Amino acid sequence: MGLSERQVVIGEVSLERMVRAVEKVRDRLLRAAKALDAANIPYAVAGGNAVAAWVARVDEAAVRNTQDVDIILRRGDLEAAKAAMAQAGFVYRHVKSIDMFLDGSEAKARDAVRILFAGEKVRQDDLLPVPELRNRPPIISRSEFGYDISPSLQRDHQGGKDGHLHGGS
């Protein structure tokens, strides 16, 4: 086998692993959104996934993958979210002042849904708190986001600046 043949085999294996990694993050996001939505818990998708969903509408080639899932919740909904997420196979942990739902009992922190609390700063030195949750007509449709099971999901993107897709009740 020549060098070029080995590169193709290595490339195919690498591509499959890359695709699988992206699919795992997408699956984690969708399972979390469905669990929270089914329990009527207001939430917002934040961070890289929110930005990627918005960017995909404008320029698909500019979309970048993210390795994590960030969700905004109201602190008062945390106990209900713990129950809903547990039914979807997630395990709640509070580690180093970060609230998260691990994707199963054997998962590592990088395989988690990280929780940001609406109206609170993530770190003391942050200039602004995490935005409050609001229900507005969706700007990004369910079919564009790849989530199509509940009529209550509302997504909101504030002019491309806040990196949040609002959801839930």
Image: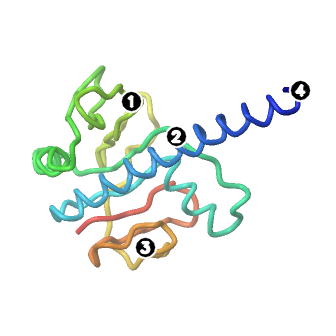
Please provide percent x and percent y for residue 135: 32, 71
Q: Of marks 4 and 2, which one's residue comes earlier in the chain?
A: 4
Q: Of marks 4 and 3, which one's residue comes earlier in the chain?
A: 4
Give the quarter of the image for residue 120. top left
Q: Secondary structure at mark 3?
A: helix
Q: Of marks 3 and 2, which one's residue comes earlier in the chain?
A: 2
Q: Secondary structure at mark 4?
A: loop
Q: Which residue is mark 4?
A: 2
Which residue lies most toward the top here?
Answer: 96
**Residue density around tag 2, few if under 14, some if 14–19, many if 20 or more, within 10 Å:** some
Question: Does 6 sit left or right of 165 as displayed?
Answer: right
Q: Secondary structure at mark 2?
A: helix
Camera-near label (4 vs 3) is: 4
Give the quarter of the image for residue 41. bottom left
**Residue density around tag 3, few if under 14, some if 14–19, many if 20 or more, within 10 Å:** some
How many angstroms separate mark 3 from mark 2 (CA)? 22 Å
Please provide percent x and percent y for residue 154: 35, 72
Tag shown at residue 142:
3
**Residue density around tag 1, few if under 14, some if 14–19, many if 20 or more, within 10 Å:** few
Q: Of marks 1 and 3, which one's residue comes earlier in the chain?
A: 1
Q: Amino acid at mark 2?
A: Ala
Camera-near label (1 vs 4) is: 4
Q: Which residue is mark 2?
A: 21
Tell me which residue sits at (35%, 49%) in the image. Answer: 71
Q: Which residue is mark 1?
A: 123
Please provide percent x and percent y for residue 145: 48, 66
Tell me which residue sits at (30%, 37%) in the image. Answer: 103
Q: Amino acid at mark 3?
A: Arg
Colouring rule applied to residues = rainbow
Name the image quarter holding the C terminus: bottom left
Residue 76 vertical placement versus 60 (above, below): above
